[in-house]
Image (cartoon, grey):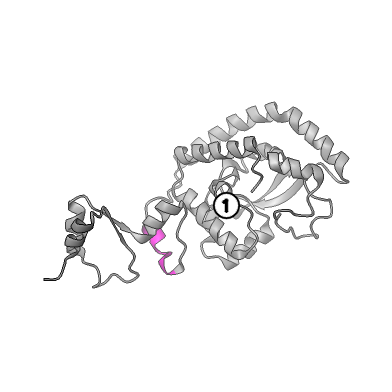
Amino acid sequence: MPETLADVVQQQSIGRIVIGLRDRRGNLPSEELLYLKSRGIIVQDAVDFYELITDKIYLDSPRVSSLLFSSGFRVSRGKMAYKRIVSIIFSAILLILTAPIMLVAAILVRIDSPGPALLRQPRVGRDGKIFTMYKFRTMRKDADSPGYQTPAQQKDSRITRVGYWLRRSRIDEFPQLYNILKGDMSFIGPRPFVPTQEERLAESIPLYRRRWLVKPGATGWAQIKRGYCVSLEDNVDKLAYDLYYIKNLSIGLDLVILAESIKTVLFGRGSQ
């Protein structure tokens, strides 16, 4: 007599069954799985299991439609209100506390290399709207060609001596506190990029525009999970983390990201 799925589960002491079939019609032992589930066995979709163990969304195109029916991706007014209130309070406090540091940083940037201390760049925000983002200049004045910004890479020769230390300490990001206070950004969210880069990626990567469902952030889930993005594949992977954040947006997840970001600043693991 052939073994049933229930027999295998009992013999191997299996506690979780992961379903990874692309086409489940006529191929899924539904009744047996339902019986096992009623006995305490976890029956889980492979896409959900992937998300559980990797902390990112599975972006395999044939299964993208599963995101539509999954839990999450509910960016409620309550969540947005809490993020805005927190942003106003803490950005105002931090602007006052970090003002002396920013003054010293601005002076050092001007001494180290020709050009302005502050860099003003157009970035893509919530719903694809363009805003001006502020940060300390960490590269040479002529680092980018007119109208086109090349993303920074590890050991980028365009980065100045002072810029290197500003990036490692994240002090170059401090002027973004003004963007947060204004409402262009939140403390936590997908990292904003320049319009030319965003449009290029949006044309190449499905679901890329879903990054714009929430305000961009000074730090985010993708920033603490992976490093610099150079290739298209890097940006696909980063999008998987950004969508995970949007899907699971919560106070708890924000606190985890904030704690990891503080560790990055304190222990000098560098900017991502």
Relative horizontal placement of residue 250, taking residue 118 as reference (left or right): left
Determine crowd level at label 1: few under 14, some 14-19, many 20+ residues with C-alpha closer than 10 A: few
- Report the magenta stretch's main SS: helix
Q: Quadrant of the N terminus?
A: bottom left
Q: Position of residue 151 (x, y in %)?
A: 70, 56
Residue 255 rendering spot, x and y as whole percentages: 50, 36
Judging by the rendered image, the residue that carries numbered circle 1 is: 226
Tell me what residue is drawn at x 43 percent, y 64 percent.
64
Q: Find residue 76 and report its horizontal and vertical position in percent.
A: 44, 44
The residue nearer to you, when weighing 166 against 84, is 166
What's under tag 1, amino acid-wise? Arg
Which quadrant of the figure has residue 89? top right
Tell me if I can see residue 136 in this picture. no
As for residue 63 lying within the magenta part, the answer is: yes
Examine the structure image and report whether residue 64 is included in the region drawn in magenta.
yes
Asked where in the image residue 110 lies, by quadrant, the reply is: top right
Q: Which residues are magenta?
A: 62-69
Residue 28 visible somewhere in the drawing: yes
